[in-house]
Image (cartoon, grey):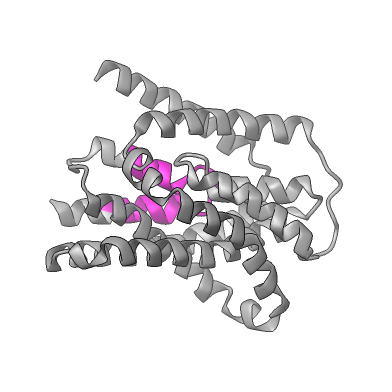
Amino acid sequence: MEYLVSIILGIVEGITEFLPISSTGHLILVSHLLPVVSSEFWKSFIIIIQLGAILSVVVLYWNKLWQIKVLWGKLLIAFIPTAILGLIFYKLIKTYLLNNTWVVVIALLVGGILIILFEKYYHPKETTTEVWPTYKQSFIIGLFQSVAIIPGVSRSAATILGGLSLGISRKTIVEFSFLLAIPTMAAATGLDLLKVGTSFSSEEWVILAIGFVTSFLVAIWAVKFLVRYIQKHDFTLFGWYRIILALLFLGVIILK
């Protein structure tokens, strides 16, 4: 059963990682519905399989990463706020937030409303060419991303809306958000493995590997889908999705 759960969560992670709907939030809510007993391993599982999805970006954007090396410094600058807050609040996040469905539901609901309001009323002048964020803009985007240490906020939504508010083109900030996920989730995974990785059993490593590979394969499709989607649509649909999902799970929590 745990192998099946690993595959299901891997699929959920792969689909949701790059969409502005919070992959961590989805993993927590789906875990709430599945026969998963909350434990240190499953909390780590939720963190670590996200790196599997992120590696799809490394594969898909390999050439761009090496052709535009100036991006490396900008990604590092954007990564700093999340790195600092992640280190400071690691224990709080792992102990109290990663199994808290109330936090996820509220974050999904509020985030959905903000996305809809942003797309309806805030229309910054976007650049018409592919211009990567400046170092200052990268740091500001990093500040937006740091809010996503709260499960349910959505790292991609925070960075993309933050970039759009700075006037960066939709396609460019979406790709920057993809790439920023690499150091962010690599660090999160490394920190978690350093803290608790030695306590995993051999079977748990197998379960983790299954979820990791599954999320990687599914995420390749999700990245391609989002790049095509943003060429003709905004994120309003995702905002409504977040609100509906939050209300549904609110009902589940109340009735349980």
Query: Which contiguous range is marked in magenta?
Result: 8-29
State the count of labels: 0
* Residue at 64%, 47% in the rendered image: 144
Work out which residue is located at the far front of the displayed protein and give it.
Answer: 88
Residue 49 place in picture, x, y as percent: 35, 60
* Residue at 62%, 57% in the rendered image: 228
Does residue 164 lie above or below 182 as drawn?
above
Q: Nearer the viewer, residue 230 or 255?
A: 255
Q: Quadrant of the C terminus?
A: top left
Secondary structure that dominates the magenta span: helix
Q: Nearer the viewer, residue 163 or 240?
A: 163
Q: As drawn, is 184 to the left or to the right of 255?
A: right
Q: As drawn, is 124 to the left or to the right of 25?
A: right
Can see residue 7? yes
Q: As drawn, is 131 to the left or to the right of 153?
A: right
* Residue at 68%, 45% in the rendered image: 161
Q: Nearer the viewer, residue 96 or 13?
A: 96
Residue 44 place in picture, x, y as percent: 30, 55
Residue 170 place in picture, x, y as percent: 73, 53
Can see residue 133? no
Does residue 108 lie above or below 6 as drawn?
above
* Residue at 78%, 30% in the rendered image: 121
Residue 172 place in picture, x, y as percent: 72, 60
Q: Is residue 3 magenta?
A: no
